Image (cartoon, helix red, strand yellow):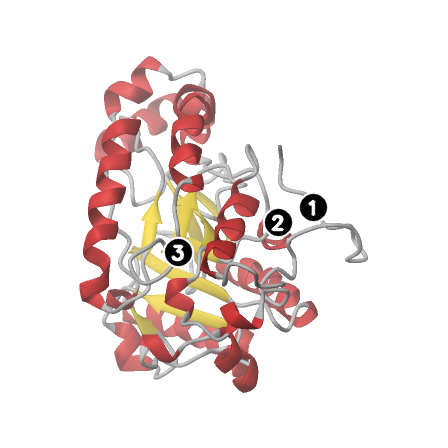
Amino acid sequence: MRITKTSADGTGDSNADWMGALSPTLTSMPLKYLAVPGSHDSFTFWVDVKAPVGPDQMAVVKYLAMVFRLPAKKMMKKWSMTQNLTFCEQLEGGIRYFDLRVSSKPGEKGLEIYFIHGLFGHRVREGLADINRFLDGHPKEVVFLDFNHHYAMGREHHCYLIGMLQEVFGHKLCPPQVVEDITLNFLWEKKYQVLVFYHHPSAMEESTLLWPGSKIPAPWANTTNASKLIKFLETTLGERAKYGTFHVSQAILTPRVRTIARGLIKGLRNHLVERNLPTIMAWVEAQKPGVNGVNIITSDFVDLVDFANKVIGINDLLLPRHAVT
């Protein structure tokens, strides 16, 4: 079952306003205890095969792309793309956490910043504008923007990007607080809709509105084995309470060089993701949010199964037995 998309006029069934529709019991709980669906490498619904290979790639990959040019980059695209849906489609489907990796484009004049995963994606400014437009139309929805990888970026690039975040989102930015104090009710009262996590020292130097990356750990299993992934997710969940932070469970498998070689033509989705989704989704459906439970859960290709609905749905486990929502 695929995520239901909202029509252009905002009508029809969707998850576009799922936070605003939650029971008051849930909106008064710390947001770190709620289950929130997120996407892994959120921006990779489009990558540019005509642009140079990104600075996040190994030298051998850059060399092969230089030698074989477009055919090599078209092959890379099959392993760089981890999502099919645009930002707007993900938001309408219920995704509220975005995993963002960014880079300047070496050799390009100016300070423009792009999304990246092997290949360059859209300009960051375009993606932020899309998210902001959605938030304008859905004032009770809140998003987590996690800028966790930065490539080919000096101090001027960071200043440019941080300034861009403040310019685009303005009063919607929630400054760092005690994590336990962040509830949906609190955010609605303050009219905050965006929590930006910035994994670089520039965040603290340039702005008081950005959260440090340490407040949203996202342990990475780095495995192609679904059973090992599940064991890792369980172990890291068991350790999350002592940190007092938000928490990301990355329900994803990571291809190794051997994996890519074996499934070169098929690509990430067909070779690795689809055949392991039943195991991963069984784990998701068995979870419970709360003090010792899941918080944010991320997945590749969030539209392939009913991912967002499943994650949102487990919040009902936090309600009193006979609560009416």
Between disc 2 and disc 3, whose residue precedes? 2
Pointer 3 residue: 289
Number of callouts: 3
Q: Which of the two discs, 2 and 3, sits closer to the camera?
A: 3
Percent across and percent down for residue 157 are 35, 67
Between disc 1 and disc 2, whose residue precedes? 1
Pointer 2 residue: 93
Q: Check disc 3 and give the amino acid type.
A: Pro
Q: Which of the two discs, 1 and 3, sits closer to the camera?
A: 3
Residue occupying image coordinates x 44% and y 27%: 278
Q: Secondary structure at mark 2?
A: helix
Residue occupying image coordinates x 44% and y 79%: 174
Could you say which disc has been placed on residue 5 in the image? 1
Q: Establish if 190 lies above or below 184.
A: below
**Depth check: 60 or 94 in front?**
94
Q: Quadrant of residue 136?
A: bottom right
User: Can residue 61 be seen at all in this image of the molecule?
Assistant: yes
Q: Check disc 1 and give the amino acid type.
A: Lys
Question: What separation in Å lies between label 1 and label 3 (alpha carbons)?
Answer: 25 Å
